[in-house]
Structures are given as C-alpha cells and as structure tokens.
Image: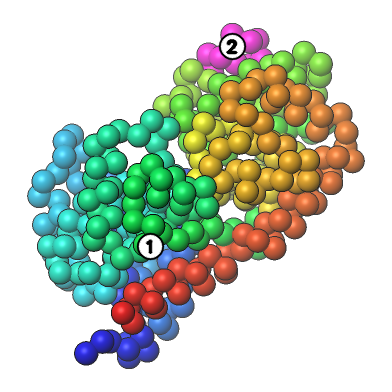
Amino acid sequence: MKPSAHSKKINILHTVLSLEMGGLEKVVADTVSGLDKTKYNVEVCCFDSLGHFAAILDDLGIVVTLLQRNQDHYDYFFPFRLKKLLHNKKTDILHMHSGTFFLGTQAALLAGIPRMVYTDHGRHYVEPKILLAMDRFCGYFVKKIVAVSHELERYLADVVKLPEGKLTTIINGVNTRQFAPLPKSTSLLAELNIPACHRIIGTVGRLAEVKDQVSMIRAFAQACEERTDITLLFIGDGPLLPLLQQTARNYNISERVVFAGKRCDVAQLMNLIDIFMLTSLSEGTSMSLLEAMATGAAPIVTDVGGNPSIVQQKVNGIVVKPGDIAAMTAAINALLENNAVRDSYSNNAIETVRSNYSLESMIGKYSEVYNELYGS
C-alpha cells in the first residue's frame, strides 16, 4: 500500500560534505530551516566537517550529524555506516548534494531506500572521467536530479549523460529579509580600513582557481590607473589566497585590496559593495551573486553557468567573457563613471531577485519534489 503524503511526517535526510560558509551550504541550511515542520522531519548529515551553518541549524532545533568519512583515501566502509544512520533515522527520502552523490547512493541502495533526490550545485571546470562514470552510475538509481540553473540542467543531460526524464531545475532562492539594501556601516569600513569616500568593488566566495579572482585583481589594477578612490574587497578564504596577495603586490595595489577572510556578517558586508564581481570560469546559480544583487550591488559577471540568466546585459548588470581583462576593466570604469547607470542597474538587480529568486519559491519547489516522491 502506498503511503499517504498526509498520513505522517516525511523523514528527510540531507547529505553534504560540510556546513561551512559557502553558497551550497547556505542553500541547504535555508532549505532545511524553511521547510514546513508540520509536514517534514528534516535532518542533515555532514561527511567532512560541521561548520558555521551547523551551529545555526542546531539553534533552530534541527539535528546535524557528523558522520566523518576517511579523509586520506576512498572510504569503502562509509556506505555501510551511512546505511546504519539511514535506518536509525527511519529515512523516507535521502536528499544528496554535490560531493555526496556516490557514497549516498550506495548507502541508500544498501538500506533499501528508493526515494533519492540529488541536487547538483555546479560542476568542476575540468571534469574527471571517474566522476562522470560515478555520476552516471548513480543516475540510474536516483528518482530526481535537480540542477540549480537551466544551463546546468542541459550540461547534466548533454555532457554528464544523466537521464533527462529525471532532471529538473530549481533555482536557488535568497532570503530578501536578510539581504536587503542598507546604508554602509561606518564601523565596518573603519574595521577594514576602507576610506568612507571609496567606491568598493567586491566579491564573496571561496578563493579558488575556478573563480579566477586573479583576473579580477588584474582588471582592478588597470582601473586603479585612472582612479585613486576605489577599493577591492574579497570576502572569503581558500587556497588561492597567497597567489592573490602576491598578484596585488606585483601590481603595487596591496594597500587598495582588502582580504576580509571568512565572515559571519556577510549580509552587512554586502551592503558595503557598490559593484559586485564574479569572474568564475564555471558556475551554477551563484548565491553570492543573488545576495549581492538583493542588497543593491551592480553586478559584473562572466558569461558562464547561470550568470547570464540572472544578469541581463546592460539592464541589471554587465556580462563579460571569462578571462577578458580588458572587458572587465571597461565594465568597472563604466559603472564608476556613470552614477545614473550604476543606480539603474542596482535598482533593477534588487527587483530581479525579489521577483524571480525568492527563498519561498525555492522551498516550495523542493516540497513539491518530496511530496511527489513520497506519494509514488
């Protein structure tokens, strides 16, 4: 007998590598905290570490379990440990996120849990063949595969070769109550040693090769040849930090580039940013971009992933080719030199997010997926 969608709460377990600061992690935290608790029992399992959002979920009464995999080599026994957790939690639906697809699918198969959902938040710039093979294997067993942009959905179908009938797109959503336009904080400017008169070009995210922040610094350095009243602000940390710091030194602009590191006050920091840059070589639907637009930053983004679906050329921002330093510099200068254009992009960016990328819409679509699977 098929279970009724209303006979009991649906037990859902989300799996992630961690709940450290990041776009994927924030999407998971926002989703599990926003789901209707009268319909769903929702928990999260981390495979590597807990992190910032784990503490927030704990405060909300949402259970987060650290089931740590072996960090040195492939953990053959991990699926059996995860199987035990799935049984203990009486899991009805396993919702896996990027990085947990292969191990999660194995565990669900061992546990006899057929209702599996996978959300792909973005791909590697260069796809390892072994990863493609693992994803294709999992694609046979999972019930629903969610991409966070339409471009990513096409990539999953055409390149990764996942079953098209199982694919759907659910765009990431932003909490527009948390991310909203506010005056710049003078205390934050003072803390970061940024002059109040400066225009701030900023970015938020992991400092990594795929984000190509080196190109951002090079474009900013060229803009600095024309202006002395601008600062480049990096919010986030990652392996590329030493190279980015050295690149700033090489261009003699170190005093105008601020590395704020990992922060818990991202919403407040976003309101310092006049121009938000995302120079990625590969992207899904960037939460940082949507959050920056929600606070009123005028965006300059590369033409990859979901970026061109969000940013309409010369309507709510500027789109450039990846690695095109000259185009990035020209975009920066154009927005710095014309306040009216920048303000127009800013206002349109705010409206774009409020109209099309709400958190409520995203959570509602995931709820529809769960209800469909549970009733099947």
How dense is the environment of label 2, judged by Cα within 10 Å: few (below 14), some, or many (20 and up)? few
Identify residue for label 2: 249
Instruction: Report the span colored magenta.
Output: 245-255
Residue 224, position as x, y percentages in the image:
75, 17
For the C terminus, the image quarter is bottom left
**14 part of magenta stretch:** no
Q: Quadrant of residue 114?
A: bottom left
Q: Main structural element of the magenta stretch: helix, strand or loop? A: helix
From the viewer's side, name the closer residue of 203 and 153. 153
Disc 1 is placed on an element classified as helix
Q: Is residue 132 visible?
A: yes
From the viewer's side, name the closer residue of 153 and 114. 153
Q: Amino acid at mark 2?
A: Arg
Residue 52, position as x, y percentages in the image:
43, 50
Asked if residue 332 is positioned above or below residue 17 in the image, the reply reads: above
Identify residue for label 1: 165
Disc 2 is placed on an element classified as helix
Q: Amino acid at mark 1?
A: Gly
Residue 94, position as x, y percentages in the image:
29, 65
